Image: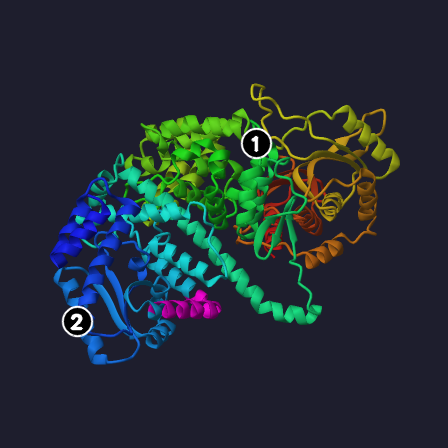
Amino acid sequence: MTGTDVRNDAEDTGPSGYAAARLRLLTEGARSGPSRRTALAELTDDWLTGLFAAATEGIAGGVSLVAVGGYGRGELSPRSDLDLLLLHDGGDSGAVAAVADRLWYPVWDLGLALDHSVRTSAEARKTAGDDLKVQLGLLDARHIAGDLGLTSGLRTAILADWRNQAPKRLPELQELCAERAERQGELQYLLEPDLKEARGGLRDATALRAVAASWLADAPREGLADARRHLLDVRDALHLTTGRATDRLALQEQDQVAAELDLLDADTLLRQVYESARVIAYASDVTWREVGRVLRSRAVRPRLRAMLGGGKPVAERSPLAEGVVEQDGEVVLARAARPERDPVLLLRAAAAAAQAGLPLSLHAVRHLAATTRPLPTPWPAEAREQLVTLLGSGRPTVDVWEALEAEGLISRLLPDWERVRCRPQRNAVHIWTVDRHLIETAVRASEFTRRVHRPDLLLVAALLHDIGKGWPGDHSVAGEIIAKDVAARIGFDRADTAVLSTLVRHHLLLIETATRRDLDDPATVRLVADAVGTQGTLELLHALTEADAQATGPAAWSSWRGSLVADLVKRVSAVLAGDTADEPEPGAPTAEQERLAIEAFRTGGPVLALRAQTEPAAPDEEPSGAPEPLGVELVIAVPDQPGVLPAVSGVLAMHRLTVRTAELRSLRLPDDVDDGAVLLLDWRVAAEYGSLPQAARLRADLVRALDGSLDIAGRLAERDAAYPRRRGWVAPPPRVTVAPAASRHATVIEVRTQDAPGLLFRIGRALEDAGVRVRSAHVSTLGSNAVDAFYVTGADHAPLPAGEATAVARKLEETLRA
């Protein structure tokens, strides 16, 4: 039966004919989706037109019947309300009331839900001005019957009012959406979501239409109509299977709804719902940012025009990283950036945005998606470091990750991600989908980066620990295989890859053992020790366990569970404990290092050399035992004297050079030269922006720094005042500790903190101010985390007394917190 046939039946038989035709339309298997909703709206229009004609017989005019809200958009789900306005010109009120009765009672008699009102145009406009929800409904006003001019006049006036009042009403609408999201939660993560009210649902899609009608901003259109259509299709199926006007997709009804939509199962249904919700939620984020930008611009523009004599102001662009700048509160690409030539730019922009706590602009993300070349395999070291920085940026990581997800960039970077994307978890303990849980775990793990020696491995393990849930069987076993592949692809060496795969394979080991096994049984502890293997891996697994549980939901972690896990870790650590380590024995100096040392001794001043980084080892070569370094190698030889560490690091900070790794040690000169000592610094540095400075310029500044004529602290303070570094999230506080029994010849002070320009200068100066000598230093930057160890002695070249060592560590920590 065609839509025309259905309408004709309704016209021929009156209300009962409408009911029969409506029933046939809703049970007709071949009709579904937008065509059925439109047909149902047209059928209802025809029926109401007949009712209106009978009700207004003998009335000259001045009355019209108007559909508003969803019915106004021509979208009727099986159990949708009929949202109607009887509009009149203020004439005979008794006659209008009689018309209303003749319209509303037949609707009620059929058991249809009705939301109705009777108003003049002036009354409708006043009510809309007082009630935002009424105004939103009237934006979709559509004429059904009666005086067309009356309806058109109201529609024109309502749209004009909306556009004139947009600067006031849009912030109100945004607040309404935020309050609703707070109450209803995020549609894309809920196991029993409300398709209409939850964030990313049909209400938000309607709000985006209202924003577009204001002409102030518009939502990104790609995929939005399809996402909205899909949610409407699911709601239709939900109405038909339950026979009720409900928008909540309850667990017990999901299989039936999936069958109604010809989907494989309830998981497939939820995944499609989540994908649609994600599109609408992201479009909402982008749109509301644009609304805010436009409204701020309108508020500031008159003052700026007055100051600039009417000229158009130029938006400020503040650099964040190479090829990445901040503009209008968003992260955009620099004008000279070339994503097609710089495959790392995508991750660099994402990391910079997360570190600054700023959103990636829609234009930037789409430009990156359209032009960025795939990363080579294995990834360059910088790409891996930028990924770690992104993962370690705390809560802002979530929004940046979602922006990349919206354009399909995450699955391009990590193809295995596709299997966990939007995957539901039918477990009352879990509050997130698999993919969001992984990101939440990384967010939680970023708070624990001061507890571990390898924060980069902790963060990547957090990202991958449940990656096997997209495959059949034990997800830990499948995840171990995937983790090995991903770790090798993004450039970790064999040793680090083995640690990551172990963490993924055993990410449930500590919590399950601690809560289900007898910890007093030595066999239990030995089993865990054998699985973990090393103290370093145990340290990482402990932090991962806590981050995973906290990211699962409030029921997954408690102080009791935490104490059980800590007890188990303590027992396993005792089993794994071996001989105490000593200061690493440095290797023999290279010929170039020895040459530089001799030249420094003979000239009495610093000598340095810059050398380009060598190619990384091939995947089948033996690992070096350390992460692949970044940037270029800077080797400096300086006659042994106080103040070398702060002088060198301060000069590098002045030249905007980021220290990725650093080694400082004392080098004895050959017997045929002299018995003196030279400090040798072998560092890897990279330019924060632009290119590296010339070696001659670095040396000249270093000479001035060592003789005290260069005020490094003052220069850095001036630069920081002129270009303050934006921090969008609160990093975990620095942690400075004295490593017990770590060396027989020196006191080892370990520093774990957030990397920042001039950090090593501040540390070096603090140690100098404390009156200690740095015997050697081992510095590494892993993502945005600095993990440093300083071997220090007193003036007598002996380790510091315990009390003095603790005081130095405490003072250094206070300095870094300031």
- Marks 1 and 2: CB-CB under 8 Å? no
Q: In the rendered view of the protein, which quadrant contains the N terminus?
A: top left
Task: In the rendered view, tell whether residue 431 sits above or below residue 531.
Answer: below
Looking at the rendering, in which quadrant would you find the C terminus? bottom right
Please name the residue that numbered disc 1 is placed on.
375
Residue 454, percent from left and from top: 53, 37
Query: Looking at the picture, how far across and down is residue 131, in whole percent?
Result: 35, 71
* Front-lying residue, 664 or 435: 435
Name the disc covering residue 509, or none.
Answer: none
Camera-near label (1 vs 2) is 2
Residue 170 located within the stretch drawn in magenta: yes
The answer to whether residue 735 shows anywhere in this view is: no
| Label 2 Cα neighbours within 10 Å, binned few <14 / some 14-19 / many ≥20 | few
Tell me the kind of residue under disc 1: Leu
Q: Name the kind of residue labelled 2 in the image.
A: Asp
Sequence order check: which comes first, mark 1 or mark 2? 2
- Residue located beneath label 2 in the image: 101
Q: Is residue 224 visible?
A: yes
Give how far across and how far down residue 616 sits, in percent: 63, 26
| Part of the protein shown in magenta | 151-172
Q: Is residue 328 above or below residue 89?
A: above
x, y (%) of residue 100? 20, 71
Q: Is residue 675 left or right of residue 221?
A: right
The residue drawn where x is 52% and y is 26% is 495
Q: Secondary structure at mark 2?
A: helix
725 or 98: nearer the viewer: 98
Q: How has the structure been colored for display?
A: rainbow
Badge 1: few (under 14), some or many (20 or more) residues near its Cα, within 10 Å? Answer: some
- Identify the element where label 1 is drawn: loop
User: Measuring 48% from the left and 42% from the top, which residue is drawn there?
Assistant: 407
